[in-house]
Image: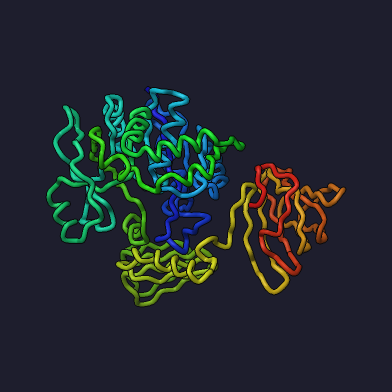
Amino acid sequence: MSIIPVILSGGSGTRLWPLSREAYPKQFLHLTDDHSLFQATIKRLQGIAGVEFPMVVCNDQHRFVVAEQARAIGANLAGIVLEPVGRNTAPAVAAASLLAMEKNPEAVLLILPADHLIPDQVEFHRVIQQGLTYARSGHVVTFGIVPKNPETGFGYIHRGQISGEGPGFRIQRFVEKPDLEKARFYVDSGEYYWNSGMFMFAAKVMAAELDRFAPDIAKQVGLALSRSAKDLDFIRMDPDSFAESPNISIDYAVMEKTERGVVLPLDAGWSDVGSWAALWGVGTKDAADNVVIGDVLLHQVDRCYIRSESRLVAGVGVSDHVIIETADAVLVAARDSVQDVGNIVKRLQQLGRREHLNRQRVFRPWGSFKCLNIEDRFQVKRIRVNPGASLSLQMHHHRAEHWIVVRGTAQVTRGDESFLLTEDQSTYIPLGVRHRLANPGKIPLDIIEIQSGSYLGEDDIVRFDDSYGRSSD
């Protein structure tokens, strides 16, 4: 019986603002090493017997980031399922179960959030094999994290009686995030685990449980898939059908109701890295218990997490703080208050600002661009085009563009012309002229683009041809 991993990559990671943004949330960030949390989730599967290529369920907005990050580590994906709107984990699990059953009615799914850190992979693999035994016998398995401290930011699972002769326990109940007193009681009792959001089950068993306990989800997701469209490597579920699905987690929809539930203890150094305090906890500390990343100078500073992305950050005489610098925003917070960073994101949304959406570097399927300066009627960008990639054939109604090549070779289409530019060469794209930029070389192409005109928004693009199936983004 094969195992199909399903990576759920729909989170927004608002508590890690300003590093995590809506268009590039925490699962795609390099927070602890050279791989993003999403990439680490894929690599964690290596060495598990019987594992097939993973399936990814993600927000439509992140489709090209998912594809590119998988490509960057040489990972093959079984498919990328696009959620037209966010509907929590139950509809995502329903979609994965139905798709898996089409390929293999006996498939076992391993559901993994894309944004977790699990350092002890040997223990992780061992417990997954235990879970496979339970899943084969018709159980719905969840993995409970053995708690190290009375954490108030997680939900808990209260274990019941031992299930069969194995290491698993029947699930007595799921518990919402407790206050500190209750959390201490849970940890001291030894009968409670943190709810990890990881699951394992036969696809046909989950489909049956959804039909029984959440028929509206099963119906609407089934319709969304029956009306789906294949787009490159992506499966686009029907937006109208999917939007009618209840917005609910798999915990509420199935796990709290099923008699098949089993919890397996997992003690592998797990962290959901859901806050800056959590990152401080798992980070490498200096002699004063500081975690320091980037260009940082400190004097009489202790127990802080300080991260610089684009410039020098200096700290003097502070303790137990988090300081995060990016090119367009700086966060300063007491370490014991970082759970409230999401409130800043809500305020940005209410004010109609954009610092919660994108960082200065914006990723596209062909590469990325970074805004260097913007003023009235002109904007300067640095554009990077990956080897072999190209932008769409497009034109603009309100702006003209100057391109200067600073690295690599550019293939330029301008009206009826096509020509090459190399380093230090430039060209001009008049307003209203069809054009395309491509990188025919083997190294990244970097250009400086100077835009001038009455309107410089990203929506002033008319596409005539696009390698990535885009019409507007």
Residue 76 visible in this rendered orientation of the protein: no
Who is closer to the viewer here, 278 or 252? 252
User: On screen, 316 above or below 407?
Assistant: below
Q: Position of residue 417 (x, y in %)?
A: 86, 48
The quadrant holding residue 109 is top left
The quadrant holding residue 339 is bottom left
Who is closer to the viewer here, 127 or 121? 127
Q: Position of residue 75 (x, y in %)?
A: 51, 36
Give the farthest residue toward the bottom.
317
Question: Going by the image, does 419 lie left or right of 458?
Answer: right
The residue positioned 47% from the left and 26% from the top of the image is 102
The residue positioned 69% from the left and 42% from the top of the image is 467
Question: Going by the image, does 415 lie left or right of 437?
Answer: right
Residue 383 visible in this rendered orientation of the protein: yes
User: On screen, 303 above or below 425?
Assistant: below
Q: How many marks?
A: 0
Q: Position of residue 332 (x, y in %)?
A: 40, 71
The residue positioned 43% from the left and 40% from the top of the image is 7
Give the farthest residue toward the right.
416
Color scheme of the displayed model: rainbow
Quarter of the picture holding the N terminus = top left
The residue positioned 15% from the left and 39% from the top of the image is 160
Q: Position of residue 320 (x, y in %)?
A: 31, 69
